[in-house]
Image (tube, rainbow, N blue to C red):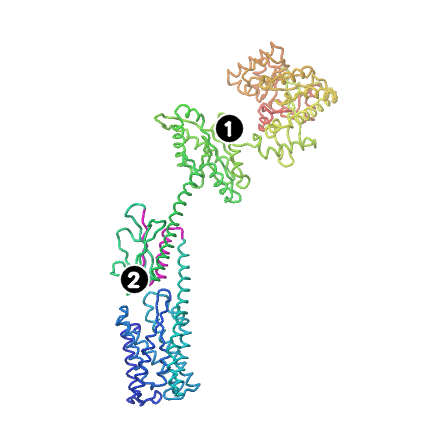
Amino acid sequence: MLIRRPSALVGVALVVTCIGMMIGTGAVPGRWLDSGHSPDPLWLAIGCLAIGLAELGRLRVRIETTCVELTWSEAAFVVVCSFLPAGWIPAAVLVGAGGAHTLIGLFDQRRTVARIFRSTAILTVAAAVATVMTRGLAATYDSPLTVGVALALAVGALGYALVTLGLTVHQIVETPGPGTRTLFTRLVASKLPMLLGNIAIGLLVVTVEDTGHRWLVLLLPPVAWLLHQAYGYRLRGDDERWTWRLFADVTAELNQLDERNTAVAGVQGALRLFPAIAAEVLVHGQDQGQHRRYAGERNGAVVEVPPGQAAEIGWRRNLPVEPRPLVVGGIQIGEIRLRLGRPVRFSRRDRHMLAAYGDALAAAMHDAATHRRLRTIAERSTYEALHDPVTGVVNRAALLARGGVMLRQAPGQAWAALLLLDIDRFKDVNNALGHAAGDGLLHAIALRLTAMVNSQELLARPGGDEFAVLLTGEEDGMLAAAIERARQLAAQVAMPTEVCGVVLSVEASVGVVVAAAGEVDMTELLRRADIAMYQAKRGATTVAWYEPFRDETSTDRLALLAEVRTALAVHDQFVLVLQPAVALDTGRPVGAEVLIRWDHPRRGRLWPAEFLDAVEHSELIGAFTRYVLDRALTIAAEWGAAGIDSPIAVNISARSLLDRALADDLPKLLEVHGVAPDRLTLEITESVVLTELAVVREVLASLRAIGVRIAVDDFGSGSSSLTFLTRVPVDEVKIDKVFVAQMVESAEAAAIVRTTVDLARQLGLRVVAEGVETGAQRDALHSLGCAAAQGFHFYQPLSPERATLVLRGARSGTGPPDRPDQSPPHDRSESEASQGPHQLG
């Protein structure tokens, strides 16, 4: 807009003045503007002098970085409106204000000619507008002071003030400062009390003139001086409040705890506090001569200036600089510089505030640097707390934390698999090559495993020579996928590695556990994986997976034992089945072995391998053994009542032979059921009898004294089978099914079976072969002189009722029912489950 230009504004003022004078002299007709009335030269001079004196009485108000001067001009305007014709008022303001501002410029170098012209023009235009407003309400020239005239003069003075402030704000908004509306509102708020006082002073002067008591004018200077002091005190108080409130705001914004953000806030705050066109913050680096610069100008962005490059703002201009070092604890950490874009007097108050602001900025920059160092230390500490120092992968704590997050964030139907790898014979590497070589081997293995895992998997080193990998997926095929993944990882571990000049090839045992993501936590997964890993080590296999029945401390195992206790009490869940043994020369049944099943109300039918291990390692083994013996003797009693004198065989657990009470309770059970001792065969494994515990020998001797028969189950599977026969008197030897299954194709297995049969014949022992499934096996055993055999080739496990019918048919000479053909039965799982080493009953 052209009115922003000082030259245009001065031109408008001159035009307004000329028009007013032409109206005043009558050159331009205009009764409404007192046309044709020429002023008294004395009053014209007094009016110019009043305007000039009013402009000299200045009060400076500062709004943030913008300074505006407030004067008594409204009082002078009221006076000249009463004593001069309307057309001459702009000319009087032009002369009086111009003279006053020129005089001010002689003593204030900041008052440039352009600024004098601009200020005079603003006042002249404002006077013209206010004169029109006043004359439009009432004829004030040479008129008695009435209420209407006083109101018109007050309205004119108000208009004069508003136009003056409006044009002033309009002129300075292009320079740095707050927005137009904010500046105008705050100027009006600061001016209002002074405006009311100015109007009152002007009306008082007019009243004195009308009453003729001109001597009262002598009282006006002290009154005006008091009012001037009061105005100044109020404006300074407002200025202080606004300034310190702003100071509090900008210093609060310095607390960024980041160097760049703090420096940016420092530049922006300085531009809000001080009358500068641009500001710069320098931060000294640790190296001598190195520093970082952040610069910005008003209403512009703050940028970080690269070293050796001038900022593209106002830095290349030849502008005065106001510097302030940033010092903390006597050490200079930087500097803040203000570029003053126009002749600005930086007062002592401004320098004090800059010193306080510099201290606040220095403290904030020091806090930011301290926070950066602490954050670096914390990040390093956090990293070290969550990562293994040897391999760089996450440690056990991070595995538990991050793994827990993975389990919680997994979809509702997702499953998780944990693979726990343990380096075999890692201790040998440490002992032979030193711990440095062991660390090098772990590091190399970690690099290989890291290269194999993807972003959805978590690799960790829980400790020692173990690594863990956690992965998630769908339930279908999860176990198979995890096992395959474990084999891949183990293959990577087994690749040759050069450590300390020695090429090493190590192997790993991997335990795998799979569970629903929401079923267990990471601690439980690690525990289960550890059990599976040790199972792999014991089994000399690379990979093994977790099976609950092998877990002696699992919650599932504890729940299973509680359910066993309940099942022993209700008598309808444990089911006894019997598998007859057949004489090979006649093909007739000559006895039966008791096997047990569990018809669980919730889990369905469970095989012995799914619960007997847990029972054997609990305090329930005694009650369970007596329960099975009681049920078996019940069946034997029914056989005796039916005229069947075949023996019944019951497997005895290893822990049962540690129970001296068993030898005392068994005779009572035999007596209760009326069964002869020689009709009960107790099957034990050879590994149990080879123990050096005296209690085992005592219990076995007691059982032999009762008269029950003792059979050796799975004979040949131990490492000291012949020693066993020399130490323990037994009645029967049962050849392990492993040798029976291989004897037709393997000469070595056939030789073991032949040797066992010959040895038993010489010792007077009965020989029974287990696990016979083919006719070829039956014929081979018969040719070797084996007395009896059992297996799916002859009979599947039968219910007690069906077994009774089989034995009764053998007694009567009829063909044995339920005998399968020469092919093995279709349900091999039952055979395998029923003929393992833990078949108590």
Amino acid type of the residue that numbered disc 1 sits on in the rendered structure = Tyr
Along the viewing direction, whichever of 673 and 647 lies nearer the viewer:
673
Residue 653 position (above or below residue 247): above
Q: Badge 2 local density, few (<14 within 10 Å), some, or many (20+)?
A: many
Along the viewing direction, whichever of 321 and 228 lies nearer the viewer:
228
Quadrant in the rendering for residue 450: top left
Residue 553 position (above or below residue 159): above
Q: Say which residue label 1 marks.
A: 534
Amino acid type of the residue that numbered disc 2 sits on in the rendered structure = Leu
Q: Secondary structure at mark 2?
A: loop
Q: Is residue 261 magenta?
A: yes
Circles 2 and 1: CB distance less than 8 Å? no
Residue 498 position (above or below residue 200): above
Quadrant in the rendering for residue 51: bottom left
**Residue displayed at 49% across by 34% down:** 480
For the C terminus, the image quarter is top right
In the picture provided, is 359 more to the left or to the right than 109? right
Q: Which residues are magenta?
A: 256-285
Q: Say which residue label 2 marks.
A: 340
Along the viewing direction, whichever of 96 and 529 lies nearer the viewer:
96
Q: Residue 411 location in percent, x, y?
A: 51, 45
